[in-house]
Image: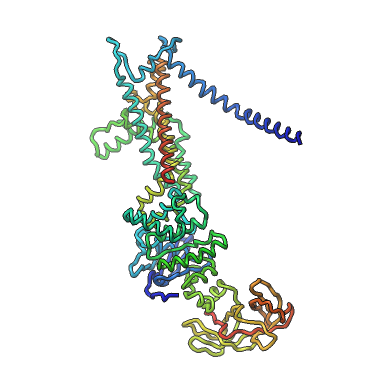
Amino acid sequence: MPEKPDQIAIDVRHVTKVFGFGPDKVHALKDVSVAIRENEFFTLLGPSGCGKTTLLRLIAGFDFPTDGEILLHGQDIAPLPPYKRPVNTVFQSYALFPHLTVAQNIAFGLEMLGRPRAEIDARVSQMLTLVRMEELRNRSTAQISGGQQQRVALARALAPQPKVLLLDEPLSALDFKLRKEMQIELKRLQHETGITFIFVTHDQEEALTMSDRIAVMSAGNILQVGSPKDIYDRPAVRFVADFIGETNFLEAAMVSSTKDRASVRLGSGAVIDASVPKGFSPSGKVTVVIRPEHARLADDGGELSGRLANIVYFGTDTHFHVDLDGGGSFIVRQQNTRDESRRAQEGDKVSIVVGTGAAQVLRD
Amino acid sequence: MASAAETARKAERDDIRKRWLLSAPALLIIFFAAAGPLGIVIVYSFLEPGSYGDVRWSFSTDAWVSVVLQRDIFDETLSIADAHVAIFWRSVTLSLATTVFAFIFGFPTAYFIATRPERTRALWLFLITIPFWTNLLIRTFAIQEVIRNEGLFNIVLLKLGLISTPIQIIYTDTAIMIGMIYVYLPLMVLPLYASMEKLDFRLVEAGYDLYATRFQVLRRIILPMVKPGIVAGSILVFIPSLGAYVTPRILGGGRNLMLGNLIELQFGQGRNWPLGASLSITLLIIVLAALLIYIRYAGTGARNHG
């Protein structure tokens, strides 16, 4: 992956958005700040109603913040109408103009910008090639498939060469296989155009596979911003750990800590090493998380022990649900091989070995 | 198997017979109340007038000639019937103006209603249709009360000192137009609303996102997409305006005739039923021509936009 320049494209500063009045007031965004770098594939991830689409609409200009600033390359764009922002959107519903052809849809933004006809034609052809839709240029948008509509929507938003492209759950209407294809396609487009992409999704897998960085949102707040690996391996709070992937939560007591490392004593009495979120100094009782694939089953000698309650076979891997001796449960995920020499049975006593650096202390 | 096929055929025959039976009342009404009388009117237009109304049963094209031409009383030369042509002209221009103004007033109204929350739209639509519950005569007299020289409009302006003598509106073409706009406005608003309600407002956002200003969004996105409503509303306003009778009669004061009044005149005081009949057919032809032009225009428009 090429080095991303650290210049900031979109700087969201203390943005609050309130909808409605009086008792119907809804705080969609609560003092949100985030800096999105130039040429970055940035994802806003969260469940529905977390405020991710609201933030996107504020950047697009369809709504205006109740408080705060949104800077685009240092200039406050929050008060500008959408047609004065060099930002384009790919809508969840695509919102293609049904009375225009594929090519006319793509040309629309350039026409509104008053570009010369020759330039528009050249750019439309270029866009059609980019999204591999050359043959369908004169089709009506009703005559093409969902995946093709998606490509037209992308081409239409990219044609005016925006500084930032906003994508509002653009893949949610596609079936599984097409979605996988489009994920790769989107990465390719972002790479080829060098435009900053801000992508909204509730699909954690989509976020992990496509993004340079992810902001996890919940209830109008950004909980954590980081690379997919950061977010997955080092979740700072319970919501992030829980929302992304499967995870095991364990109660533990602090033994000692340095700046970003800590020793914690688990319920079983074992003391393990754990990483700590930046700028957080834990004490007393804490919660640690361990991903199921960062632990493995053993006959003995592990930090945790228990009885195997359930074995769930997934094809690529197997989940072992263990009832821990001190109470609580723990899931271990193991990659399947065709080596059948050693097989645990439900009801077996097992020991769980936690990998080095697998544990993470949560802030809450 | 043969009997099964037989049964199927019989069921189909029964089905067809049932359909004819069910549509018979409607077909009878259409024939006796519309097609039949229309035939009589066509026949009458080729007869001679009776002395006290009615018709004399001898073939003549005089009525058709006098639709646009008049015979000089002294030397029997033919010249253009200025009065008739003026009335045709007034009818067409007033109806066009009424349609245009109904659109200008109706479009924002329909847009307003279509953008209200769903639960309040029914109320707004109800308010639009309230005038329909009132008799046309009463509504027209109400308009007269407002715009006549001693009416509300002039009194208010006089009292405010904005004018020193009443503005003559009543018994002018303007009065007729105001009356017709008022009467036919709902016929413009309702089809406009129907097509705007189906409008996906995310397309409007997409337009703004792609650098279109408010006016460009209106012209390039909203208008093309609500075109069916515009066409329907314009037809619904233009056609009844063309044949309007009560409104020009009351607000035009019998001086500014429209086609409807001219036709009534021929069947009444004029005692020239064949002329009345040929004028009626002429009106019908104008209406059909207008419809054809409109459908043609709407059709090519739709093709242009793919």
Residue drawn at x 39%, y 66% as measured from the top left: A67
Q: Tell whether B285 sits left or right of A257.
A: left
Q: Quadrant of residue A306?
A: bottom right
In this rendering, position of residue A243 left or right of residue B10 = left
Locate the N terminus of chain A by quadrant: bottom left
Nearest to the observer: residue A269 or residue B304:
B304
Does any portion of residue A20 appear in the rendered image?
no
Q: Is residue A109 above or below residue B300?
A: below
What is the number of callouts on the image? 0
In the rendered image, the residue lying farthest to the front is A135
Q: Position of residue B140 (x, y in %)?
A: 39, 30
From what the image shows, is residue A128 above or below residue B280? below
Classify residue B74 by image quadrant.
Answer: top left
Query: Where's residue B189, x and y in %?
Result: 43, 40
Residue B166 seen: yes
Identify the colour scheme used. rainbow
Is A193 situated left or right of A339 in this image? Answer: left
Q: Is residue B20 above or below residue A213?
A: above
| Residue B285 occupies quadrant | top left
Q: Give the image location of residue A77, x and y in percent.
A: 35, 64
Camera-side residue of A300 and B249: A300
Which residue is at 52% across, 71% downward?
A: A208
- Looking at this rendering, what residue extends furthest in the left direction? B164
